[in-house]
Structure formats: C-alpha cells, structure tokens
Amino acid sequence: MGKLVVSLDGVVIKDVQITKDKTTLGRRPYNDIVIDNLAVSGEHAVLQMVGADVFIEDLNSTNGTYINGKAIKKQLLANNDIVEIGKYKIKFLLEDNGDYEKTMILKPGTATATNSGFGLPSNFGALPPAAASLPAAIKVLTGAAAGREVSLTKVVTTVGKPGVQVASITKRPSGYVFAHVEGAARPTVNGVPLTGESIALKDGDVIELAGTQMQFVHS
C-alpha cells in the first residue's frame, strides 16, 4: 500500500500509512489527516483507495489542491507525486511498487475522442519492452477508436471518462477483475449493470463504459 509524507518548508511533519478505503484530510480535528493551518479547509480533500489505486479528490476547498503544481479536482496518484495544500507538501509513496506500473487513463479531448468524450492516449496499445508474455487486452468496439486495443500489462488499468464514469481492471493471480470507480451510472458487463464491488472478467466479455463498448480478450 501507499503512504503520505507531509512536510512544511522541507521539514517532515508526519508520515501516514494509507490503510482505509477513504482517508480524509483537512483542518478539522475529525479528519484522518489533520493539518491545522488556515490555508487548509476544514474538509479539504479525500483519498480513496480502489484496489491498488489511490485517488485524491478536492472537496471544493477554498485554496484548492495541487498535484505537481497543477490544480486538480480528482486524480489518480502515482508514485512520488507531490500534493500541495497551502504551504504544505505531501509526497505519495508506493511502499512496494516493484510490480506496479502507473495506470493508464483513457482521457477525453484527444484526437481519437468520440462524441461521448471517451478518448485514448497517444500511446494506446503500446507494449513496454519488458513485456515477457502476451497479457489480456481490451478492444474498443464503438466510436472513432473502434478496433484499437490496449494490452493490460499493468497491475491496474483505469478506463473511462474522469468526472463521468471510470472503472478499473485489476490483474490478479486468479485472473482479471473489473470494478466501478467513479460515476453515478454503473458500467455494464454483457449488458448487465455491475451491482457489486467487482466482477471477474472472462474472454469475450463486453464492457460498456462512458458510452463506449469494449471487449475483454484473454487467450
């Protein structure tokens, strides 16, 4: 799991392990991580753990939440990311990231984005040189990106449209597991809305997410 190292002016103030599904951060004493400073809102941000992923979401704070100098609303944290709240810097560290790679998010606004806003990054489908065997993949069935594939080489791959509908596919020893991460509407697998926390994927399963259909392929 990950941990947070909170510092002010280069001096480490506290070191917090992320062990809960939701960890709150703010000035009020009932938060899991309390930063007693007027630049920090009473309920400033929340960290949500989904499988191996940790997301941070700004709770409409007065001064905002920044990651590596960029203001965010909700974002997946990567190893060594620096979260900035007021003058405080919070470094996110994955304690065991030897088999964990940065998650790929299918972002809107790219050249291949469809009318639904579901898009693919420029390196979509690229395999890392170290890939030793062919992993499972997801194949896009609808929209402008139809026919494109992405190999599921990461421990966790996050797909969808941030702020609308996001899901994750986690690689486990027993197989691949699909889980809902964000959005009021639940994604579907073979036309059936996901009702529980997660579901095991089988070869040929059709996922519909953020208005786009994808097929899980595992030979």
Image: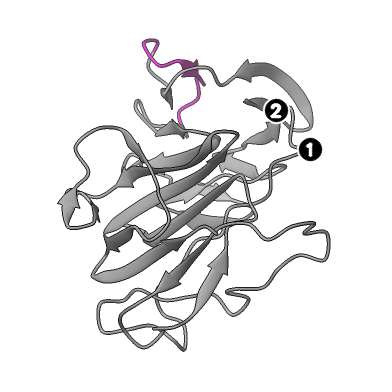
- In terms of secondary structure, where does tag 1 sit? loop
Q: Is residue 212 left or right of residue 64?
A: left
Point out the residue furthest to the front here.
Answer: 219
- Which amino acid is tagged 1? Gly
Q: Who's the residue at 46% across and 54% down the image?
A: 72
- Asked whether disc 1 touches disc 2, contact meaning CB atoms under 8 Å apart, the reply is no
Q: Which residue, given by chain and number where applicable, does mark 1 sit on?
A: 98
x and y percentages locating residue 29 in the rendered image: 40, 10
How far apart are the alpha carbons under marks 1 and 2? 25 Å
- Tell me the magenta residue range: 29-38
Answer whether residue 185 is visible to the viewer in this image. no
Pick the quarter of the image with the N terminus.
top right
Q: How many marks?
A: 2
Q: Position of residue 175 (x, y in %)?
A: 52, 40
**Residue 30 in magenta stretch:** yes
The amino acid type found where label 2 is placed reads Ser
- Give residue 116's quadrant in the image: bottom left
> Is residue 87 shown above or below 151?
above
Counting from the top left corner in percent of width and height, residue 88 is at: 62, 34
Q: Is residue 210 visible?
A: yes
What is the chief secondary structure element of the magenta stretch?
A: loop
User: Which dot marks residue 61?
Assistant: none
Q: Nearer the viewer, mark 1 or mark 2?
A: 1
Residue neighbourhood size for the residue with mark 1, other residues' Cα within 10 Å, grouped as few (<14), some (14–19), many (≥20): few
The residue labelled by disc 2 is 7
Left or right of 192 on screen, residue 117: right
Mark 2 burial class by Cα count in 10 Å: few <14, some 14-19, many 20+:
some
Q: Quadrant of residue 41?
A: top left
First along the sequence among labels 1 and 2: 2
Image-based side of 62 in relation to 4, left or right: left
Residue furthest to the top in view is 29
